[in-house]
């Protein structure tokens, strides 16, 4: 079965493998691979001992978010639009290059793995964007992808399958 949630999970797995050897600076001076986040940061209210959303974002940099944006059904198939957002940190140097390096690794991994998980076909065009305003020392860029998602096969409905209708 092909669903947008499965697509997001498959992309997260692919991206984790593609970026695991890219070591990037964190705010505390350590180096590590980007954290891969499906969808959104945890947006629940911060409770006792739980960091705020801003603190969680700051602590997670560098990261890649894989976010479902929209879906559409057409006559023969469906599609899903997925945004892949990369953010890096660097007090010195050109961290924008790190951000673009992450997106390039992801792009290459996606193109080598088509169709993704043998069920999701990448549609063209793939779009990249980096905002002109950069809140130094953080840098962000994103890639917008569109995927064909197969429709479930029609099955013959059995009597009483969904209860009795009057």
Image (cartoon, rainbow, N blue to C red):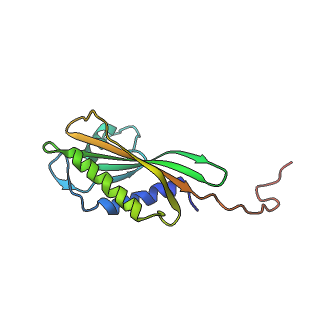
Q: Position of residue 140 (x, y in %)?
A: 29, 42
Q: Is residue 77 found left or right of 159 in the rendered image?
A: left
Q: Nearer the viewer, residue 12 or 93?
A: 93
The residue sitting at 17% across, 44% down in the picture is 94
Q: Position of residue 123 (x, y in %)?
A: 49, 53
The residue sitting at 77% across, 59% down in the picture is 161
Residue lying farthest to the right in this orientation: 166
Q: Is residue 130 found left or right of 93 in the rendered image?
A: right
* Whether residue 35 can be seen here: no
Residue lying farthest to the left in this orientation: 92
Q: Position of residue 86 (x, y in %)?
A: 32, 47
Q: Is residue 106 found left or right of 27 in the rendered image?
A: right
Q: Position of residue 129 (x, y in %)?
A: 35, 42
Q: Nearer the viewer, residue 141 or 64?
A: 141
Residue lying farthest to the top in this orientation: 133
Q: Nearer the viewer, residue 5 or 44?
A: 5
Q: Nearer the viewer, residue 155 or 159?
A: 155
The residue sitting at 14% across, 49% down in the picture is 29
Residue lying farthest to the front in this orientation: 125
**Figure quadrant of residue 141:** top left
* Whether residue 77 can be seen here: yes
The residue sitting at 31% across, 57% down in the picture is 105
Q: How many marks?
A: 0
Which quarter of the rendering shows the N terminus?
bottom right
């Amino acid at each position: 079965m092909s669903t947008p949630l499965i697509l997001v999970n498959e992309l997260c797995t692919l991206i984790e493998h593609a970026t695991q050897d890219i070591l990037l600076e964190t705010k505390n001076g350590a180096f590590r691979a980007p954290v891969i986040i499906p969808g959104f940061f945890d947006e629940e209210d911060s409770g006792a001992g739980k960091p705020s959303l801003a603190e969680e974002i700051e602590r997670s940099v560098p990261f890649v978010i894989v976010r479902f944006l929209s879906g559409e059904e057409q006559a023969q198939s469906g599609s899903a639009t997925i945004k892949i957002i990369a953010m890096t940190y660097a007090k010195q140097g050109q961290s924008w290059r790190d951000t673009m390096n992450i997106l390039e690794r992801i792009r290459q991994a996606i193109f080598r793995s088509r169709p993704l998980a043998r069920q999701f076909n990448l549609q063209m065009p793939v779009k990249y964007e980096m905002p002109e305003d950069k809140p130094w020392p953080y840098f962000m860029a994103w890639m917008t992808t569109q995927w064909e998602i197969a429709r479930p096969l029609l099955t013959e409905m059995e009597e009483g399958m969904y209860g009795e209708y009057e």
